[in-house]
Image: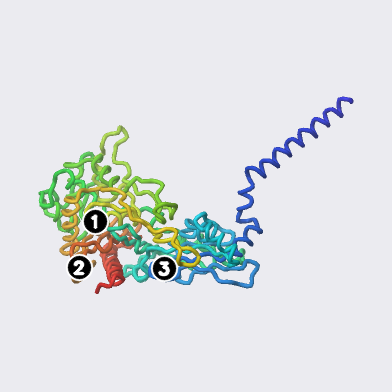
Amino acid sequence: MNAPLRRAGVVVMVLFGLLFVNLNWVQAYKADDYRNSDYNRRVQLAEYERQRGVIQTLGGKVLATSKETDDELRFLRTYPAGEAYTPVVGYKPVNLAETGIERAENDYLAGTSDQLFADRIRDMFTGKETSGGNVILTLSARAQETAFKELQDNRVGARKGAAVALDPTSGAVQALVSMPSFDANPLTSHDTDAAQAAYDKLNADKDKPLLNRAVSETYPPGSTFKVIDSAAALENGLEPDSVVQGGSSYLPPQAGQPIHNAPGVVCPSTLTLKQALTVSCNTAFSRLCVDKLNADKIKSEARQFGFEEDDLSVGRLDGEGIPVAASHTGDMLRPDGQQDPALLAQSCIGQSDVRMTPLQGALIAATVANNGRQMRPYLVQQLKGPDLTTVHYTAQPRPQQQPISEDTAGKLRDMMESVVRNGTGRRAQISGYTVGGKTGTAENGDNPDHGWFIGFVLKDGKPITAVCVFLEHAGSGGSSEAARIAGQVMRAVIADRGGD
């Protein structure tokens, strides 16, 4: 054989070798990816042959269901409860990525989960069509819809915001709302071009309705962070009646600009720690952090409450859920590693680089209400089989951490009750119930200030709910309006439990 033929033979052999390797790669390693791809039409047809499970509230309100159609894809996913629930429930489109609980519990809802193996076997013998499992959420329909309506109709003209309500004793999420929201039904259309167009329109909206502001975005918390400062002070030997320095302004060491109190706040030169929280005295808390505490103590206290925790989610306690952004205290040090008094003073009033999710705000209030014990938040109460009688999972609440002692929690609870009774949180008051909380106004560059309120409600000393309300760019009166909305959400939870 001459040289050219030998070279050609070698090339052919190499090509056959590469083809063999690629074939094995596809069959052995990539088969599952190709088989399960959203763009594999056979997979889509098979998936839509099975009726997807229902998502509903604990009280039975249907949030997501599937109805039979005459289309090539047999079942259409629909969301009858409307925009109030979209950030939690999410959506399950044909070609786009699913979100929310639809994503977190996709296998169970689709009927392919190992937990539903026995159901599938039983259906094989009975000849019954197999359908997906059903997901029962912890949400209170009354609280969720009240929070959504009050945010939408807020009295300061805020276009964006969030609200979260938790059961302090269990961690169950009673409400989780993001504003603005959107109708998910166009995104699940079997007309994939129409679904893509609907998504593109939402994605281009300047108000970003696709963002879940309750859990996926962080914001400067303003004076709500003073609850963390107060906890650190109490844990380090101070008492509610300990005298602290206040005044109309405070210039931290090495700072270029003094810290002032918010307009209308009267802060005397000396006052108690409880009074400082009640009137929300910026100068008192900045001085407290610089003179009696330090950056390490503040950052440590914040970590105890849940700041700096990555890889968080809220859904099932033992599984994946909706991703939660980490809250951060930011940098309080100079480039040489030494404490920066100016940054510390700003951080202690919830400014500088401090950032918090509304969920974290609700967790802070819930921890204080629950005697210092923080429960892990969750959204999924039960997983039920297709027949709605077989239960494959029931949430078993569990503590997440103990940020503060029971004694400190009691003192802090009393201080926060004073804020609502005598201070900046009066609009959250509920007759016949004990309400505690903390307002927050956070500067945000040249934009209007954010408005915050975190708080809790008790009856005969027992926690009912803890709430955080956030109004983005709310401007003047934003924190007071947040307190009013929080009070309405608390009332909804009370009514849901049979209270007045």
How far apart are the alpha carbons under marks 1 and 2?
16 Å
Give the percent coordinates (x, y) of residue 97: 54, 57
Name the amino acid type tagged 2: Tyr
Q: Is residue 308 above or below residue 50?
A: above
Label 2: which secondary element: loop
Tag 2 or tag 3, which sits nearer the N-term?
A: 3
Label 1: which secondary element: loop
Residue positioned most to the bottom: 500
Tag 3 or tag 1, which sits nearer the N-term?
A: 3
Label 1: few (<14), some or many (≥20) within 10 Å? Answer: many
Label 3: which secondary element: helix
Are the residues tagged 1 and 2 within 8 Å (C-beta)? no
Give the quadrant of residue 173: bottom left
Q: Residue at x 32, y 41 (%)?
A: 331
Q: Which mark is residue 84?
A: 3
Label 2: few (<14), some or many (≥20) within 10 Å? Answer: some
